[in-house]
Image: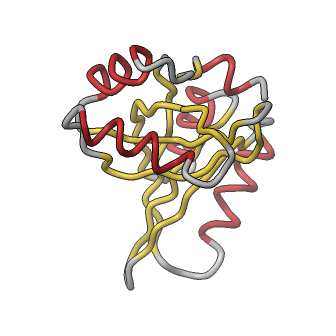
Amino acid sequence: MRVEQISIFLENTSGRLAAVTRILADAGVNIRSLSLADTADFGVLRLIVDRTDQAQQVLKDNGFTVGKTDVIAVAVPDRPGGLASILELLDGAGINVEYMYAFVQRSGDNAIMIFRFDGVDKAIRALTQAGVHVLKGQELYAL
């Protein structure tokens, strides 16, 4: 139920983000979701792609610093309070959300959110025991 995410460290200069997307495009890697956080000097680009290992290798081959992290994709009810109910469930289980961002597509009556937790296995157990749909990697990449 874990999803692989790659994180790319980028200098905060013109053209670096374009370079990453061009390298991935030329390698035939499809970006499914992304998040970009920045400071004055650098940024962290987090990506869910359809071919993680290939993306990681081609970016490293082109001089980028790339890491791989396990995240969780969660089906969140797409209605007012849907996200609040998921976050309250996690809080009640003592699970900290390190960061989160939205996936590009809805799945039925749900939005898909990507979460990074300090306790991934504990979060998966808490969510699944509460009947929350935690997507498998292949299920997510196929959306």
Q: Residue furthest left?
A: 94
Q: Residue furthest bottom?
A: 40
Q: Is 97 drawn above or below residue 141 in the view shown?
A: below
Residue at image point 62% right, 55% down: 80
Front in this rendered view, residue 51 or 85:
85
Front in this rendered view, residue 21 or 127:
127
Front in this rendered view, residue 33 or 15:
33
- Which quadrant of the view contains residue 108? top right
Quadrant of the drawing holding the C terminus = top right
Residue at image point 61% right, 81% down: 14
Q: Is 138 drawn above or below residue 62 in the view shown?
A: above
Residue 13 is situated, as x and y percent measured from the top left of the image, at 53, 81
Q: Is 31 drawn above or below residue 9 in the view shown?
A: above
Front in this rendered view, residue 141 or 105:
105
Residue at image point 44% right, 33% down: 71
Residue 112 is situated, as x and y percent measured from the top left of the image, at 64, 39
**Numbered label tally:** 0
Residue 44 is situated, as x and y percent measured from the top left of the image, at 44, 61
Q: How is the image coloured?
A: secondary structure
Residue 113 is situated, as x and y percent measured from the top left of the image, at 57, 43
Residue at image point 51% right, 23% down: 132
In the image: residue 123, left or right of residue 26: left
In the image: residue 117, left or right of residue 36: left
In the image: residue 140, left or right of residue 106: left
